[in-house]
Image (cartoon, coloured by chain):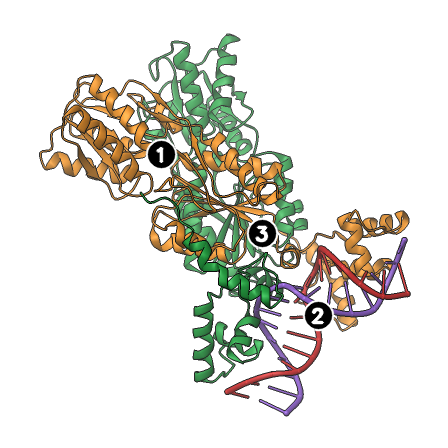
Chain colours: A green, B orange, C purple, D red
Amino acid sequence: MKSSRTVSTRATEPVEKALAREGKQVTTPQRRPTQRDIAIATGMSQTAVSLALNDVESSTVSREARARILRAAEKMGYVPNRMARNLQSTRTHTLACVVPDLTNPAYPALIRGFQSAAEAAGYDTMIFDTDGTLEREKRALHWLAQGHVDGVMAVFFHVNEAAVLKAVRTGMPVVQMESQTYRPSKIIDKVYINNAAAVQAMTQLLLGKGHQRIVMLSCHKGPGAERERGFREAMRGAGFPARIIEAEDFTQAAGERAITTALAAGSQFSAVLAANDLLAIGAMAALRVSGKRIPEDVALAGFDDIPAAQLLHPALTTVRRDEQDIGRFVAELLVARLGGSDSDLPGRGFEMTYQLITREST
Amino acid sequence: MKSSRTVSTRATEPVEKALAREGKQVTTPQRRPTQRDIAIATGMSQTAVSLALNDVESSTVSREARARILRAAEKMGYVPNRMARNLQSTRTHTLACVVPDLTNPAYPALIRGFQSAAEAAGYDTMIFDTDGTLEREKRALHWLAQGHVDGVMAVFFHVNEAAVLKAVRTGMPVVQMESQTYRPSKIIDKVYINNAAAVQAMTQLLLGKGHQRIVMLSCHKGPGAERERGFREAMRGAGFPARIIEAEDFTQAAGERAITTALAAGSQFSAVLAANDLLAIGAMAALRVSGKRIPEDVALAGFDDIPAAQLLHPALTTVRRDEQDIGRFVAELLVARLGGSDSDLPGRGFEMTYQLITREST
DNA sequence: CTGAAAGCGCTTACAG
DNA sequence: CTGAAAGCGCTTACAG
């Protein structure tokens, strides 16, 4: 291996000297070229450069001039400054995904689908992780208000629709996912599944297997409330008490803590219905520690069908929706509104489908 | 449930009419207030408004004027336009994470750590998913060139350092993760673990258990090359052939396909060493389909220790590093360079630690 | 203590 | 076919 040489340094010396001779700043040797630089280099006006680079239909920069400009831009390594363009056009060509927890595998799948559809339509994607806390959701709203993006898909646990509308620029399309209320909104589109019905169905599945002492391991945030409602209705319909164990978060750690605590307190149950898969996995760990077999001693069900669900032992019974497909759908919704075709439609609600996946854990 | 009423529509009518009477545009009823609007409302200059809002130390807007401005800003719901601010200050207060695959659980953990440290320092975080393809990595570079962010942590599989340097604004701090070469760079910081050594150690662990026909299930992208090198060296040292099965991607699906194909072709082995956990999980699925027991018939090891690794049956032997901690570290590296304290340091290399986690699969 | 002015890099009427 | 000019909403010397 050759030791580092000084050739490259030497190579730049003449340039620096030349600049210094002209009395120019040497501290920022490679400022990015602007349209103005191209204009000077080609002898055209900055307007002509902008017109040529952006291929504006109405304009008619001569073929020859245009070619010269493009060549110079290429040679100088011109890249448009997006901040300037955004300021001028009040369009950022960027969409945002606001999610509570990137480490919950349900969200990356959603985002992937979103991003692929967004990109196909010429939009970049920004992702904001709120950690599922009120404070960071407010930060997200503030961030949205600053004009970073043209549209947003958001999963909010705490902040309500009024707060969202207040924060966001009038006319900016918003799709709220799994919003607590499915009431139609004047402006905001909502995409969700019928959480109550899904959990009700799952509860009935457990009841059908003869379980009577079913507890729900839930978290009273976001879709948790609706899922709990479905559980309560199913249990009431069957004439059994609906016991709910609240975890602090939709995470594995919180699920494990909650079930461990419940077991220590002498809680008795033959089935655990978790409000999402991460909680279910936490429950699985806690049950295992306490020596309970799944499903022989305690049946277990989750919600989301994250990739790990089918790899567990026992594989987890759960509720699946096609996150990637939903993400794609939402991005297309936003793009359609931005394209102008759907821009003046009132807020709509889209109920997506789901299916129960029965596996070994029940 | 009440049917939708028209009260809200009526409520907005007076405003629209009032605007129309004044001959103003009604299409964008609530343009966001700017500093100019506040200036007009308070009778101060726009400069004074900017100074007051930004709490500029050197300036001395009178206490009374400042209070009036802040009150007006609050009342009018003023939020600064970030595009304008960014254009002026050439600072975006945003950092980027460029990763190959958000659905690989290793990356969300990295990003979470990154984002928490970035936020603590006053930076927002943008995430770009390249899908591990050359085309999208180029898109990412182009996107970086447009000035969206002040600094970036990137995992590139295809694009090399020269291309990164060419794309990025001079002086913009870059941390490359797991870069193919660990040679020090003039400018770019590198953060990595010793992939070759880690895989070498893992191979020796398998050799120590008596395995001789070990195959590596790898993907020749990003850190794959170094990991393969470690495998080759360990096998050569032991005097056995180093067989490598190449998967198309670092995904579960690719791993499953590759092992299924290899088994169909009559490949014989007593252990599979996968270049990451997702590949290992794919291998597990393929082995299970073919009736092989793990670890009795075939031992299996992975790399990353994603959350699912310990939940598998059998639980997966793998290599762990603290992704969250690494993400935090990288963000702090960028922030320090942006803060000016480290801004003129040459590119440095940071080797992070890892550990082998032995579980049931070996 | 306060304001007029220049300028960040673009886009887009508008007038030759 | 081409360029001078205004302006997007800010920050920051600079001159009162």
Marked residue chain, label 2 = B
| Numbered badge on residue A307 | 1
In the image, B74 versus A244, the foreground residue is B74
Q: Report if the CB atoms under discs 1 and 3 are less than 8 Å apart.
A: no
- Amino acid bearing label 1: Pro
* Residue A149 position in % (x across, y down): 57, 54
What's the chain of the residue with tag 1?
A
Please state which of the two labelled residues, at mark 3 or mark 2, is closer to the viewer.
2
Disc 3 is attached to a residue of which chain?
A
Badge 1 element: helix
- Looking at the rendered image, the disc whose residue lies closer to the viewer, 1 or 3, is 1
Give the residue at mark 2.
Answer: B25
Residue A101 in view: no
Decide: is A122 above or below A316.
Answer: below
| Residue drawn at 46 percent across, 45 percent down | B188
Amino acid on which disc 3 is placed: Ile
Coordinates of residue A193 in the picture (x, y in percent): 46, 41
Give the residue pinned by disc 3. Answer: A188
Q: Residues within 10 Å of mark 3 (few under 14, many from 20)?
A: many
Picture coordinates of residue A200, whole percent (x, y): 45, 30
Residue B182 location, quadrant? top left
Position of the N terminus of chain A, as image quadrant, is: top left
Location of the C terminus of chain A by quadrant is top left
- Where residue B154 sits in the image (x, y, percent)? 44, 44
